[in-house]
Amino acid sequence: MNDKYKDFRRMVVYQIYPRSFKDTNGDGIGDLRGIISKLDYIKDLGANAVWLCPCFKSPNEDNGYDVSDYTDIMDEFGTMDDMDELIRELHSRDMKLILDLVPNHTSTQHKWFQESRKSKDNPYSDYYYWFDEAPNDWKSAFGGGAWQFDDVRGQYYLHTFAVGQADLNWDNPAVVKEMQNVVDFWVDKGCDGFRVDVIDSISKDIENDCNELGPRLHEYIRALFGREKTSHLFTVGEGHTNEIEDIVLHCAPDRDELSTIFIFDHMECGRADKFTPKEDGLGTLRDYLVNWQRKTSANGLLYSLFIENHDQPQFVSRIGNDRELRYEAATDIAAMVYMLKGTSFIYQGQEIGMPAAHYDSIEVFDDVESLGHYKDMICKFSLEEALEKVNFGSRDNPRHPMAWDSSEGHGFSDAEPWLLHHSRADEVNVENDLASDKSVYRFYQKLLALRAANDAFADGDVEVISKPDDEYFVYTRTLGDEKWAVICNFEKETEIGLPFRCEEPVLANLGRDAADGKYLPYECAIAKVSK
Ligand code: GLC
Ligand code: CA
């Protein structure tokens, strides 16, 4: 059988938030040359692909997710020559480039919008949704209503995100064509795939609920990725549905739509809502993972393994332990997730167990979403409580600059960074991690190397050995007569009994063999099952 996803299960995608990765020209903002300078660090970790958050021209109301020109580079990030060089440098290391395509909306500064607003009758007039009166009461994901009156055109336009992010009208065939051209431009440049922003929102039913999938969604996804020129690409959609029926339609191998999609429900671990924590344990994570491993493999789908991204506060701070057992928790979670079946995604900083930001003033925050919701919060909560909530849930948590070392600018920039470093950057940074005998990076490195060296981790069947009530997660990966056990204890010291015997662990985060079956908090081990 032709296995369409075989190579994709071997992909380890390192996600970069370019603004916060590495500054090389001293303006406090990360740039493409900074990324080029760190490619060996990424490659050595074991990644074979890089996903860049949007690096196209943008006024940065939502840090690049408001694109004003899809085929040019954001001024702060560098030039097209830098991008060409980055692509060459990646490919020479046998690494792939995944760009972040934002097809649902453009910046209101995009030429299409600037033309569109001029009149009700011009070549661009139907590129967006325009109405004399708001036709529904949809809300913006960043707080407030989703319809904005535009003085120039004298009508309302739709923005399901920030006011400066106008939703494109995909029912206009000219919009479909424009976006195909954007994709083709980057494919011609050598881009190997796309992460596709809020993909399941591009088709809309204005009469219905904002969260409902629109009637022409699949037609539009195929228009992008089901063409001869694009069907080889690796594509991962950002969607909001957790319904397996929808997910099958988005990414079943015979659909010519997406390779895979991020399923977000495990992001609810450790929180009651985006800005409110909840006491939770690793059992919750295990249950979500098990559920989706089963559903995706029953339907022949490719699963996306991830725990962090540029929108999600650091997982280790949220549900693990980012203090005295930070190394143990970060590495245990890594083994729980990345030995499963699917494509692996690792967000910058995750590989050293970077914690959440912990800022002490609202002034420090930058994120349009946090500031939008903060306005609502201070009507209901005290200022201290509102700040605590923002600190818990803000997207500035994953967006603080990479701390590369212990120097004053932490090796990110010689200038004042665009966003403050996290509050423990003197302690938690790449230099210290690599020098420590408890290095999260080195654990990831070994884990990914193990995965790469043994096909059972990419292609083998997953069998869950632990029971739902157990305080640990044990699963096996089996391919032919090769069988591996992955044993991950949770928060408490636990005795783990196995129904089979194992050889000595090939990888164990505490560097010991818990041969008596007694596992310490967050201890994990990966071992071959004895024949
Ligand atoms: C996605 C992105 C997020 C962005 C939003 C609007 O959810 O991940 O960062 O703000 O889309 O483009
Ligand atoms: Ca810079």
Image (tube, rainbow, N blue to C red):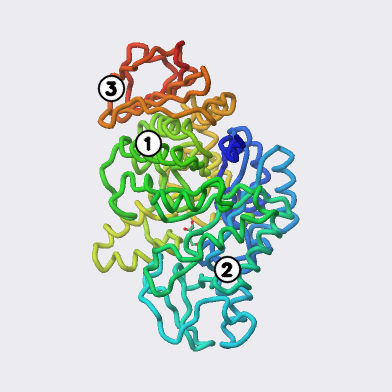
Please provide percent x and percent y for residue 477.
46, 25
Q: Residue at x 58, y 28 (%)?
A: 452
Mark 1, residue position? 290
Q: Residues within 10 Å of mark 2 (few under 14, many from 20)?
A: some
Q: Amino acid at mark 2?
A: Pro
Q: Amino acid at mark 3?
A: Thr
Mark 3, residue position? 494
Q: Name the quarter showing ligand 2.
A: bottom right
Q: Residue at x 49, y 89 (%)?
A: 154
Disc 3 secondary structure class: strand
Mark 2, residue position? 59
In the displayed structure image, the side of residue 155 where residue 112 appears, left or right: right
Please provide percent x and percent y for residue 310.
48, 51
Disc 1 secondary structure class: helix
Disc 2 secondary structure class: loop
Residue 388 visible, this angle:
no
Q: CA distance from mark 3 to mark 2?
A: 52 Å
Is the CB of mark 3 within 8 Å of ligand 1? no
Q: CA distance from mark 3 to mark 1?
A: 21 Å
Q: Would you place residue 273 above or below residue 280 in this image?
A: below
Please provide percent x and percent y for residue 476.
43, 24
Q: Amino acid at mark 1?
A: Val
Residue 273 visible, this angle:
yes
Q: Quadrant of residue 175?
A: bottom right
Query: Which sits earlier in the primary sequence, circle 3 or circle 1?
Result: 1
User: Which of 174/37 is in front?
Assistant: 174
Q: Quadrant of residue 294?
A: top left
Frontmost of labels 3 and 2 is 3
Q: State which quarter of the image contains the N terminus.
A: top right
Query: Which sits earlier in the primary sequence, circle 3 or circle 2?
Result: 2
Query: Which sits earlier in the primary sequence, circle 2 or circle 1?
Result: 2
In the displayed structure image, the side of residue 37 where residue 394 appears, left or right: left
